[in-house]
Amino acid sequence: MIPRPALLRDLSASYVLNAGVTVSGDLVDAVRPALARLDPLPGDSGGIDVRRDPELGEEAYRLTVGSRGVEIVAGGRAGAFYAAQSLHQLLPAASYRFTGGGSWPVPGVRIEDEPRFAWRGLHLDVARHFFPKREILRLIDLMAVHKLNRLHLHLVDDQGWRVESRAYPRLHEVASHRPRTATNHHREPDTYDDVPHGGYYTLDDLAEIAAYARSRCVVIVPEIDVPGHASAILAAYPEFGATGERHDVLDRWGISPAILSPLPPTVEFLVTIFDELLGALGETPYAHIGGDEVVLDHWAASPEIGAYRESLGLASVNELQAWFLRRLADALAERGARAVVWDEAFVSGGLRQDTIVMPWRGMNVGRRAAAAGHDVVATPVYPLYLDYAEASSPDEPMAIGDAITLADVAAFAPVPAEWSEQERAHVLGVQAQLWTERVPDARTVDYRLWPRACAVAEVAWSGGVADGFDGRLAEHLGRLDALGVEYRPLDGPHPWQRRRPHRPSAVRITEVMSRIDALTHDAESTRPSI
Ligand code: ACM
């Protein structure tokens, strides 16, 4: 099974689960989405019994398969849902197909399980390339199979804005598409396709995605990345920018100097956008406000922004950025959501104490955030940026660089041994990132995520991959096959997944890491030049 349960004991008895098996107990509704492919029926005789035990944590469960049926005892809805996912993994891989009417032998087992980390996340950049709603729903189903429970959607970047706004409709009308897209490798001269690219989720789509996710114990974490990464917003509403100039939705990659203004009208605009987003998503405990890779030059050059900064008694544009992000986090707190930021925002200082920090530039800066009392979700480039190639091979599809292997991900320790107990207590969990500059379609999303995200899931659930991971993964790939996942085979890409033409990768992960290390030791630095 992946992730491996905390405790699993074989029992001598076994059971046969037939389509139409009855499910009874007070948590029936929680397990139904997990067992949909098995066609369970509500009923009160034998089959699967699912009961709540208030002594267990919300995500904890016990699962017993004996000769008379399946007994699940769970702390809450999530525990019952994960018990059902574990039960499904005990069946043959073919049970993941929509064949219907199956009759599946289940080995007798006793499982006692609960996750090590509360935050078990995947991030998907839907701004650089848009992935339609059906792909998001499918990804939520795949996350649920792996007991992953946070889907962080990066909804805006220089290259596109991806949500309907009824208050500011030019965002989805103008900022959601670009006429062409860069196709060159990192550090090569720019080349472009001539293909328009775009798309956005309506607020009704987002409400549907959030409801679908909730019933599968996944929380959607929306990100509006500000004040940098702003070209698309400023293509639609240049008046909210630092210079007032209109920008184009970017058609190439890299860090842009486009930046929002910190003045009150821009803050009001963003609060309105968050009101629309949070309204559509429903109970949303977190909202990500970005804060990464901000080029503050336009703030420093603007007399109006300089005068505003002085009126606030702030000494530097870095302090002004901290103040701006703090105002957004305060507005989110009033609406019941905790702010999440990338680590540069922590380095700039002035965060609310309840703001969650994502240390993408490495766990050193994550440790500093934890020592300062912030909750932290481990998101370091190495080894959790799954836009890096899986191997240093010219056969791999074009990636930002190479290589972050499955073994690299599997070896990740989210709470390093040398951290103090207090620092370790602030690690909420683990999240893998999929940036999509070089992920043009859903087939490539499958290739990049799987099976590396299987290792992420086990690290997040168990605190590290458990014994026998390779053998369990080999079996698990049969489930992914049945689910129709176009994962990367362990020995390299299929012929149709290979890169053409062959080109050596431009960037090595070791080179990126040494540059990021240098930058994160410099508190003033906010701009790694990768
Ligand atoms: C990031 O990779 N800029 C968070």
Image (cartoon, rainbow, N blue to C red):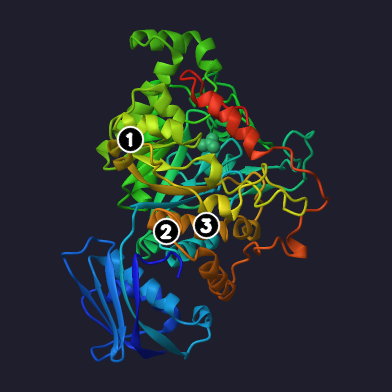
**Which mark is first along the chain, 1 or 2?**
2
> Which residue is nearer to you in this view: 288 or 391?
391
Q: Residues within 10 Å of mark 3 (few under 14, many from 20)?
A: many
Rendering quarter of residue 323: top left
Q: Residues within 10 Å of mark 1 (few under 14, many from 20)?
A: many
Q: Are marks 3 and 2 in contact (CB under 8 Å)?
A: yes
Where in the figure is residue 281, as x and y percent of width and height?
37, 52
Amino acid identity at mark 1 = Thr
Q: Which residue is mark 3?
A: 453
Amino acid identity at mark 2 = Leu
Residue at horizontal 33 percent and vertical 58 percent from the top = 115
Separation (CA) of disc 3 from disc 1: 26 Å
Rendering quarter of residue 11: bottom left
Q: Residues within 10 Å of mark 2 (few under 14, many from 20)?
A: many
Q: Which residue is mark 2?
A: 148
Amino acid identity at mark 3 = Ala
